[in-house]
Image (tube, grey):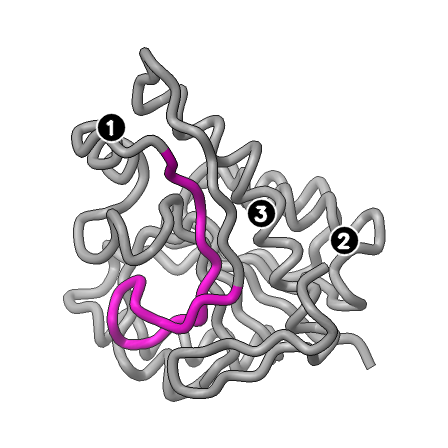
Amino acid sequence: MSKRIAVLVSGGGTNLQALLDAQARGALGGGEITAVVSSTPGAYALDRAKAAGIPGRYTLSRKDYSSSQLYTKAMVQLLRECAAPDLVVMAGFLVILTREMVDAFPNAILNVHPALIPSFCGKGAYGLHVHEQALAYGVKLTGATVHFVTEEPDGGPIVLQKAVEVREGDTPEVLQRRVMEEAEWNILPQAVALFCENRLSVEGRLVHISGGAT
């Protein structure tokens, strides 16, 4: 029986598109994206979901809630009532959710972060800021990480990582694009497929992959 996947988005949805493309070629381990939820009204990611024929498309605006906890409770309710997902994927989702989300979907929430955790992560490290931090520090390698979500921002057990070269003269925008193309768009669908194939198990901070990574 295929696993139902809900994808949380905030903007253009490039990582969502990578998942949709993987689904179209049968590369999500039998999983099926059944719902996309945006924290931003009018996000282009919802247009991508519509074009791909995703049946559940919702907007739950962060601005409509006075606290992160109230927003998180509303998100959990929406997901449970409208999507009933086996897996929740945060794909460029820029809202930090509170404990209620992790309690509702333990070891069933994946997030992609545009750096090699534990570098350049945590509060304030999102979007272009991550790449600005990497360039300012002078690292020669950066990359992307897919991890399980816990209460600690970007602090959950790591599923997959992929390194990307930092080149002379890179701007944050150029580096961001390279990290997406060479890392994020590859390892996010791969991690989702591993989950849907029941090949991931969590032991403390360690994520074991049965059969090895694909």
Residues 180 and 88: in front is: 180
Label 2 element class: helix
Q: For residue 151: magenta?
A: yes
Q: Residue at x 61, y 78 (%)?
A: 200
- N-terminal label among 1 and 3: 3
Label 3 element class: helix
Hey, which residue is sitting farthest top in the picture? Answer: 169
Q: Disc 1 vs disc 3: which is toward the camera? A: 1
The quadrant the C terminus occupies is: bottom right
**Amino acid type, residue under disc 3 in the picture:** Leu
Does residue 162 show up? yes
Whole-percent x, y for residue 206 in the image: 45, 78
* Residue pointed to by mark 3: 16
* Residue pointed to by mark 1: 135
* Residue pointed to by mark 2: 23
- The answer to which image quadrant residue 165 occupies is top left
Q: Tell me if residue 37 comes above or below residue 132 in the rendering.
A: below
Whole-percent x, y for residue 195 in the image: 64, 72
